[in-house]
């Protein structure tokens, strides 16, 4: 059986506590993540961006070093993409790259994530071209990892919505439908995963599962004392299924059929 498993963490936000993010709890939460990994023993670790909360160049470099040291202590390979906080002061850290793991093709897509922006998020053509090339050349079941979710619908990019006025169209790329069409035409993509929005969400669009995972350190709404979600996930993909289990304050599980590969 063609099987791959991986652990997933996103939006660690190591750094100060700001708004809904309890960045000072990040290292303790990572201890729980590491303990869970040692029990599950996945093939790899996937980090989906915003390892830190951006403050300034010097502090951000120190925060990145601390997080990198934590992952270097883990006895398995880890792969990551940049989030908007990761690049805010220090610039590009990760570029888009592909990796084969146990008969599956992982596309770690690192396009533009610059925020805030007067025009919101956007995809330069070079970022689209990279993904297009990789999708056209893969012959394996493919997983696309990005910081920004790719499951947006037309209303998600309307400027008149109150939420979009607040975040400046910073939740999705307007080209999301174009990217999804590319992945559907490829006929190899079985799963897309992202973070950024600090929510748990599943959408299945034309046979491709889109999972957005909650932040490791987002504050739990309504908690009597400030409490991080401590959210991290484990994914197993077989010839027939995509199995997702998220641990933390609000556990979540999905047992999903995997689309056939043509």
Image (cartoon, rainbow, N blue to C red):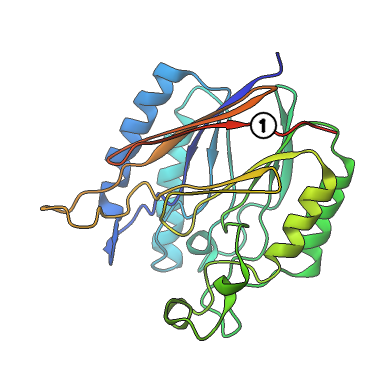
* Residue for badge 1: 258
- Residue toward you, 61 or 48: 48
Q: Residue furthest top?
A: 1
- Residue at image location 49% in from the left, 37% down from the top: 8
Q: Position of residue 3 (x, y in %)?
A: 66, 20
- Residue at image location 46% in from the left, 47% down from the top: 213
Q: Quadrant of the C terminus?
A: top right
Mark 1 packing: few (<14 Cα in 10 Å), some, or many (20+)?
many
Tell me the quarter of the picture where residue 190 sits. top right
- The image shows a total of numbered marks equal to 1
Tell me the quarter of the picture where residue 121 sits. bottom right
Q: Position of residue 52 (x, y in %)?
A: 42, 55
Q: Quadrant of the N terminus?
A: top right
Q: Position of residue 168 (x, y in %)?
A: 50, 80
- Residue toward you, 166 or 112: 166
- Residue toward you, 66 or 184: 184
- Residue at image location 60% in from the left, 63% down from the top: 152
Residue 207 is left or right of residue 125, and the answer is left
Q: Position of residue 136 (x, y in %)?
A: 88, 46
Q: Residue furthest left?
A: 224
- Residue toward you, 190 or 198: 190
């Amino acid at each position: 059986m063609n099987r791959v498993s991986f652990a997933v963490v996103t939006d660690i936000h190591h750094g100060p506590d700001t708004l809904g993010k309890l960045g000072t709890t990040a290292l303790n939460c990572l201890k729980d993540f590491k303990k869970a990994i040692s029990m599950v023993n996945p093939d790899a670790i996937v980090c989906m961006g915003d390892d830190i909360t951006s403050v300034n160049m010097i502090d951000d470099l120190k925060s990145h070093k601390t997080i990198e040291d934590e992952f270097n202590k883990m006895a398995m390979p880890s792969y990551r993409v940049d989030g908007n906080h990761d690049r805010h002061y220090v610039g590009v850290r990760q570029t888009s790259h592909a990796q084969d793991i146990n008969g599956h093709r992982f596309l770690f897509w690192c396009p533009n994530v610059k925020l805030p922006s007067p025009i919101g998020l956007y995809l330069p053509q070079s970022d689209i071209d990279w993904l297009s090339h990789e999708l056209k050349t893969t012959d394996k079941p493919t997983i696309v990892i990005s910081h920004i979710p790719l499951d947006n619908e037309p209303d998600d990019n309307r400027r008149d919505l109150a939420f979009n006025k607040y975040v400046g169209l910073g939740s999705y790329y307007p080209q999301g439908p174009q990217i999804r069409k590319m992945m559907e035409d490829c006929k190899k993509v079985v799963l897309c995963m992202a973070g950024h929005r600090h929510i748990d969400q599943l959408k299945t669009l034309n046979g491709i599962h889109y999972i957005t995972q909650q932040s490791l350190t987002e504050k739990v709404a309504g908690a009597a004392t400030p409490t991080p979600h401590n959210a991290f996930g484990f994914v197993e993909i077989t010839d027939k299924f995509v199995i997702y289990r998220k641990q933390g304050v609000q556990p979540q599980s999905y047992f999903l059929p995997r689309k056939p590969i043509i």
